[in-house]
Image (cartoon, rainbow, N blue to C red):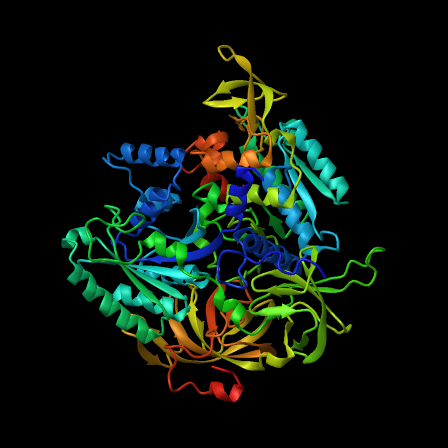
Amino acid sequence: MTSTTEQFADLSATTLLRFATAGSVDDGKSTLVGRLLHDSKSVLTDQLEAVERVSASRGQDTPDLALLTDGLRAEREQGITIDVAYRYFATARRRFILADTPGHVQYTRNMVTGASTADLAVVLVDARNGVIEQTRRHAAVAALLRVPHVVLAVNKMDLVGYEESVFAKIAEEFTAYATGLGVPEITAIPISALAGDNVVEPSANMDWYGGPTVLEHLETVPVSHDLTACPARFPVQYVIRPQTAEHPDYRGYAGQIASGVLRVGEAVTVLPSGRTSVIEGIDALGESVDIAWAPQSVTLRLRDDIDISRGDLIAPSSNSPATTQDVVATVCHVADQPLAVGARVLIKHTTRTVKAIVKEIPSRLTLDDLSQHPNPGQLVANDIGRVVVRTAEPLALDSYADSRRTGSFLLIDPADGTTLAAGMVGESFASTAETTIQADEEGWDF
Amino acid sequence: MTATVAHVHEGTDAPYALSHLDALESEAVHIFREVAGEFEKPVVLFSGGKDSIVMLHLALKAFAPAPVPFTLLHVDTGHNFPEVLDYRDRAVAKHGLRLHVASVQEYIDAGKLRERPDGVRNPLQTVPLTEAIQQLKFDAVFGGGRRDEEKARAKERVFSLRDEFSQWDPRRQRPELWQLYNGRHAPGEHVRVFPLSNWTELDVWQYIAREKIELPEIYFAHEREVFQRGGMWLTAGAWGGAKDGETTETRLIRYRTVGDMSCTGAVDSDATTLDAVITEIAASRLTERGATRADDKLSEAAMEDRKREGYF
């Protein structure tokens, strides 16, 4: 094996971490992202030259690293980030997909978008201002979306004399607040994105800090353990039936394992029909395997020839979810048109899309102070609220707390296809006592 | 049963981790199958370039042992590399696929498009592409675009709704949450789908190496007669060649991207193998497009502007 091949082997063995950044407009989020990309040597010469050229043409002395991330005309004109952008960088230890989300209050839905697939969220605060409303909002969204790891980056430490006491106070206040919302793991790091302290390189200015830099933490935080520890869930995407001379009888159910582990020989139940069978074979994109796990895309073959189509869910008979037509959930409203009680919508859950009606909107949450407003009648853009939705056909739902994939759904406007709301099944800190349908009655395991 | 633990990631304590290439592959396959499950008439844009070759490979894996349930569409600028067209036709024949070709040359000959003074035909692809989509009534169009290519593409959704004029409006994009892709569209509208959104150039090359995928020869170092224009090495062809003051010389080069010959530059390289290409890309200080594409240098927002008009 040549040294090149070894290097390639090392590169291919790296894992992938998806993370999102959140911060208010002037907290230095673009600088942090720019610093991470720049110091990890992920900004290439021609990109940097383009930034330098535009910065100079605007009369700026130093390259404006925000130009690296603001990709649209309107964003550059206004100097703000409008929409989520995805960035890619790598170190020797790991590959990263960064969802760079805007900080404006009116773009809460964009942070929800970025956080929905993130394993980790970086919440930025300005050391001079400490925990502010926007910080609490970001922590609440991270908690609501159940992002497994949250990093509090206390930025601009250079402007508070690198004082440990300033950092300690902010870290303590944030940790208490976020823990109260159910955030499972919080790591606080004092940084200066502008000066480069503790972003990629450890800071010489903060001897009192013994923890990792932001990049070190991103490189070493564990990922994806939760997915395979959960019960197996397999939403059927597509039925593969070649009907060729070579494969006259092949019938495979293609899909991506949403959670858990599947094994040949396992007894399974197909929902919502409730029919049972046994996994006869697993085809992992061309090779036959005995075992497969989330999030692998595979094709299952079952022992019995039963009626299964797109939208069905295959789960272990020993641990399959209940089905229901009454969905109780927290939703984040992401469309400009409101969602009102009585609205007829489509609900897209895994690979299944069914008709539904919004029966109740028991409460709307104010993210700033987490106060509940009962029966608001409707939700508008960026609102977070509880809903009760009646579906035309039964759905096999998990609680979002148990599975981000089988516990999440979209509400879609059947008239024009607009995505109206992002839903998370089951209880959350946004739940109120007034919710009419008790989750327990549905047999869900919270 | 074979290879039960082939993909277990070594070096962590996680029993069931996936390598990043496996994770990207799994996600892309999921996207292909979603489209197959939800759309009436999808098509895969296929140019014979490395990204579309990887897309075809993923589609073949996604539906195996059944054939790929999509047709292919190539927008031929009329100035494509002959080696690439040859590869395209061989791939189509090998997998028994159906290929539609939308021809920029035919549009020019019919007087429906006018040649640009600089001879660059990439921007002219938009009209034949969008008309082919309308005429053949495709409702989902797979493209090999990656978000790492360009900052307007960094804003692109995996499922990107286009109106009846194929226009992209970045401010009116649907939020895209979890892996729940919303493909709803009105008649006449269609959805552009980008299964490689989360791949980088290096990922594509590593995947090609891992899967032992054949590529057109021009991706590997070879001696070729080239001349320099606008800081790029171009190959003369039917589209034109060196003008007064430009001299042709033989250099050892390869291509990082494959597009219209008039605007796709070669890079100096001695990388003749996949391993050597990967080493070269990993060490490169230039982006793929910055190094080899003239059309992206036209303005700060060249890609955004073209995408708005319906470019992929």
Q: Is residue A174 above or below residue A442?
A: above
Q: Is residue A323 above or below residue B56?
A: below
- Is A21 on the left or on the right of A58, as rendered? right
| Outermost residue to the right | A245
Q: Nearer the viewer, residue A19 or A437?
A: A19
Q: Is residue A52 above or below residue B159?
A: above
The residue that appears at 48% across and 85% down in the rendered structure is: A439
Locate the N terminus of chain A by quadrant: top right
Q: Position of residue A438 (x, y in %)?
A: 46, 87
* Res A65 → quadrant: top left
* Res A330 → quadrant: bottom left
Q: Position of residue B50 (x, y in %)?
A: 60, 39
Q: Is residue B112 above or below residue B161?
A: above
Residue A61 can be seen, yes or no = yes
Q: Nearer the viewer, residue A38 or A31?
A: A38
Q: Position of residue A249 (x, y in %)?
A: 82, 63
Q: Position of residue A443 (x, y in %)?
A: 53, 86
